[in-house]
Image: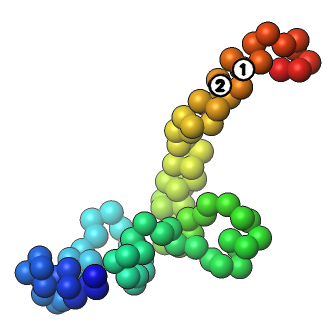
Amino acid sequence: MTLDDILQKANVSSESYHKALAMNVTGRSLVLQRRPCDININNYNPTSLSAWKANMHVQPVMDAYACIMHIVFDVTKDDREMGKVLCAAKKEHSDKDIRHK
């Protein structure tokens, strides 16, 4: 399905859609053009991705506040999955000596 198909089904004109994209109450932002089928793919840099070989989300920093908010979000984000893995490993090796744990 293309963006035009979606807009047509929603009965929204391309002009209205682009006006809505231009509205931003939180400051400046960048909206990258992508196909509707790619909405779940984070922004990335192919060169960095091949070196990093892990999930990444490339995001331009538009001002100092946005930079601080991004850093704070990354530092404080919930990482429950890693906690679950560590708890499972602890239970699995509960009968082992401290060196093995």
Q: How far apart, in angstroms, are the residues tagged by discs 2 and 1? A: 6 Å
Q: Split into 4 quadrants, where in the image is the C terminus?
A: top right
Task: Say if mark 2 contacts mark 1, CB within 8 Å.
Answer: yes
Q: Looking at the image, which residue sits at the far left?
A: 11
Disc 1 residue type?
A: Glu
- x and y percentages locating residue 2 in the rendered image: 28, 85
Would you call the spot at circle 2 few (<14 residues within 10 Å), some (14-19), or many (20 or more)?
A: few
Residue with the mark numbered 2: 88
Disc 2 residue type?
A: Ala
Circle number at residue 92: 1
Q: Nearer the viewer, residue 90 or 83?
A: 90
- x and y percentages locating residue 17 in the rendered image: 19, 81
Circle number at residue 1: none
Above or below, 80 against 34 in this view is above
| Left or right: 74, with 66 as reference point | right
Above or below, 50 against 14 in this view is above
Q: Residue at x 77, y 70 (%)?
A: 51
* SS assignment at label 2: helix
Q: Residue at x 26, y 77 (%)?
A: 21
Q: Residue at x 28, y 82 (%)?
A: 1
